[in-house]
Image (cartoon, rainbow, N blue to C red):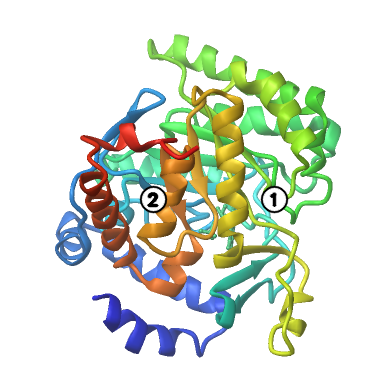
Amino acid sequence: MGSLYRNLIRPVTFLQDSEKAHDRIINLLKFFSQSKRRTAILRQLYSTKDLSSTVFGLTFPNPLGLAAGFDKFGSAVPAWPSLGFGFTELGGVTFHAQNGNKKPRMFRVNSERALINRMGFNNPGAEGMSNTLDEWKARGLWPKNPVGINLAKSMVTPLEDAATDYSKSIDLLWNAGDFFVINVSSPNTPGLRDIQESNSALNQIIDDCSEINKRKGEENSLNPKPILIKISPDLSSEALDNILSSSTAKIDGIVATNTTTTRPTSTPQTEQIFSEVGGLSGAPLNDKSTELIRHIFNKTDGKLPIIGVGGIMNSDDAWNKITAGASLLQIYTGLVFEGPSITNEIVSGLRNKIKEKGFTNISEAIGSEA
Ligand SMILES: Cc1cc2nc3c(=O)[nH]c(=O)nc-3n(C[C@H](O)[C@H](O)[C@H](O)COP(=O)(O)O)c2cc1C
């Protein structure tokens, strides 16, 4: 299946504008999402073997998830597990619906297996997303695998009111999500990443979201849901350590990392595209994100679960992130360049590595080379 994608589907898809191609794929997956019979077709083609673990109280059938940004509207929620993903992160969702930045805003850098995007959180808003997710549930098509929701700040909300914006979103989406990710690391919303540099601003957001989380739990006679934060790979180590020392006790995990505003050394081929404003993802981000994961694992003595994301293009990249300290993994750009069979390639590769190294389960491998 992998070579079919690489030799036939990818060349045709890559003739189209990057965002248009993405929208077509989402529409196709939306079609497959409409009934159990249709998702079963995908499952036959792409299902992965079991590699289960329990992280922040949730059980994951395998550690590979879909990264935030791919399904911003919750359009294909039932399809993702059928493509072999162990979990899904939907969004980013802002409290207010918004269109995002002017197009074009997503660019492929084929020679580097990378993307540059400045989407600016085009999304249906928390209420719109909540309605869509309720509908999947009402139709009995909600997946068994955990579904997280990535939360971001609305463009119209001033930075000083960010905490209210995030917490109002969590209030509306609490019933739908299994876990929540506070995203303060997108480079495409002016000032958003500054929140990471200010302990008080970040902690205010975490505190307000946690308060809603606790209240919702009490109202529903359920435990509060895990809340994570997602950080940038461009943080200075001082800023990262400040976050870890002031916020670790308040959160259930950390997603490392978002896209980078830095660029690899350009060639005449890539010079023009690298000058596009936005966050870069894919292969060039891999090492940077893995080193950040290693740093976080060591600083927190392996006690804070890490979702490792950034440049995973194959099972070796995935293994390196697990052994550096990630408990779970996510991909976005790897799916674009390698196609849906990447899930099977990665999960099977991880299972083989676990056996080869003499571990009995994935949890033993986490941080083993940190
Ligand atoms: C087009 C695009 C949109 C994205 N949107 C979001 C988003 O809404 N929220 C978020 O936290 N990350 C977003 N991301 C970042 C990804 O979730 C991921 O952290 C990043 O792309 C690195 O992983 P990768 O190298 O596997 O793509 C987006 C990435 C891309 C390429």
Query: The disc labelled 1 sits on which kind of residue?
Result: Ser
* Of marks 2 and 1, the one in the foreground: 2
* The N terminus lies in quadrant: bottom left
In the rendered view, tell whether residue 139 sits above or below residue 58.
Answer: below
Relative to 18, residue 31 above or below? above
Residue at 70%, 83% (x, y): give it.
Answer: 270
Residue 208 in view in this figure: no
Q: Name the residue under label 2.
A: 319
Beta carbon of the mark 1 residue lies under 8 A of ligand 1: yes
Residue position marked by numbered label 1 in the rendering: 186
Q: Where is residue 145 in the image (x, y as percent from the top left)?
A: 29, 40
Q: Describe residue 118's horizontal placement relative to residue 353 as left or right.
A: right
Name the residue located 48 percent from the left edge and 25 percent from the top edge: 226
Q: Tell me where residue 86 appears, x and y as whole percent.
A: 31, 46
**What x and y, as percent, mark residue 119?**
67, 63
| Mark 2 residue type | Trp
Q: Is residue 302 left or right of residue 138?
A: right
Q: Which mark is residue 100?
A: none
**Please, what secondary structure does the residue beneath circle 1 have?**
loop
Q: Nearer the viewer, residue 35 or 265?
A: 265
Q: In which quarter of the image is ligand 1?
A: bottom right
